[in-house]
Amino acid sequence: MPFKKYDKILVINSGSSSLKFMLFSMATETMLAKGLVERIGTPNANLVYQRDGEAKSCQGIAAENHGKALAMACKMLADPDRGVLKSLKDVNAIGHRVVHGAEEFSDSVVITEDVKSSIKKCADLAPLHNPANLDGIVACETVFPNVPNVVVFDTAFHQTMPKHAFMYAIPQKYYDEYRIRKYGFHGTSHKFVTQAAADYLKKPVEELNLITCHLGNGSSIAAIKGGKVLDTTMGLTPLPGMIMGTRCGDIDPAIIFFLARKGMTIDEIDNVLNKESGLMGINGIGSGDMRDTVNAAEQGKSSADNAINMFGHRAALYIGGYYTLLGGADAIIFTGGIGENSAPARKSIVSRLEALGCKLDEAKNKAVFGVTGVISTDTSKTPAIVIPTNEELMIARETFRLLSATLKK
Ligand code: ADP
């Protein structure tokens, strides 16, 4: 019954000038079609569209705002030649990614006016993301007036962190007044791979200690005890923790005062730490991409080689700490563009984990590329496992879960 009522679920990830969409059939968890509208609000807006198993197509469109962008995307989904739906009426539900749910949301939620107001309130903590996410929700409410919308927050999965893990050691009044604390991000991905790891290891999630490493342009690591997050590396914002594509990760916060006293403005420093740091800042080739970094290192560029070592060193530091806090781990999971595909980056991390009983198997590591597979030796006490993430499917599953639960009431 729920599959009939909520089979076709549209997943929307709305950014400030882009709107990504993916349509699933939940009966088989099949992705039917996906696409992206880019440069919304400019004369060069365009729609990239792809049916499952077919090549991408790209066309210029008029999309002055998110509503128009969504309307164009939907037109394609119901196109008689290229579409996958007979009619837009076949869309049963919509799942939205929202970046920040602060302390208000520890789970996904069906959209109401109150929920929208709360998302607006949380925009204080994610000024670039939450308003854009809301634009996508409002657009869907207009195009699909009677279809239920569900929100899945990047922060929600991390809300189980205990206070001693999420508080910063700054005066309490800043938490009381502004809710300055660690929130964590990539929660949808950490949750997806946690469930997938439990399936792979054939154990209930409640009985597992996992360390999940989501390594992409943005990277975060989480310690997961019995399916609940104990700690994670990102914080109030997605800037701290791992060395990322262009973000610095952990640094001495006094570097900010130092640079300010040298005459840089707060905005300039913000830009440097978010957009010019990480791999881009240190690899000597001006690219935040791990592939480029690995290529440069292989051609003998020592700064690129150092960047990969810094990346591995930082990750091992967190994995080791989380291993201790968890009291041991059943597995260390790698996911995200780098975690799934970059054998050299994984080697840089796993080769530093022997003290945890996790030893890299070089041949297996080289062979696992974009698929699930073990990359540690058979005798490793703590296996390292690659599991591809699927945040959109997770959002669709959450949407289905919440709406099916309302049917049972
Ligand atoms: P985002 O955080 O933007 O979603 P991704 O998860 O797509 O990012 O990860 C992007 C990173 O993954 C880049 O550093 C890129 O070099 C790396 N990556 C993607 N594909 C490969 C590949 N085939 N081999 C090595 N690295 C890859």
Image (cartoon, grey):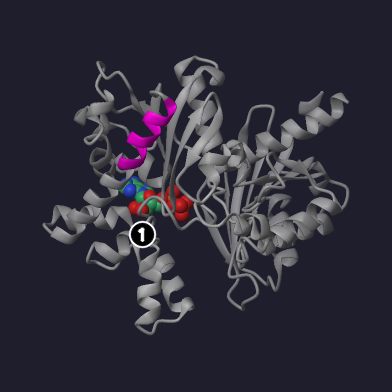
Q: In this view, does 278 lie to the left or right of 364?
A: right
Q: Is residue 203 above or below residue 43?
A: above
Nearer to us in this view, 188 or 209: 209
Label 1 CB-ligand 1 distance < 8 A: no
Tell me, yes or no, if residue 196 can be seen here: yes
| Quadrant where the image shows the C terminus | top right
- Residue 395 lies, in percent from the top left, at 64, 40
- Residue 148 lies, in percent from the top left, at 82, 44
Q: Is residue 195 above or below residue 343?
A: above
Bounds of the magenta span?
Answer: 317-326
Q: Residue at x 19, y 55 (%)?
A: 306
| Quadrant where the image shows the N terminus | top right
Q: Is residue 73 left or right of residue 202?
A: right
- Residue 23 lies, in percent from the top left, at 66, 43
Q: What residue type is labelled 1?
A: Ile
Q: Is residue 193 magenta?
A: no
The secondary structure type at the circle numbered 1 is: loop
Query: Of helix, strand and loop, which mostly describes the magenta segment?
Result: helix
Q: Residue at x 60, y 46 (%)?
A: 155
Q: Mark 1 points at which residue?
A: 251
Q: Does the magenta stretch include residue 319?
A: yes
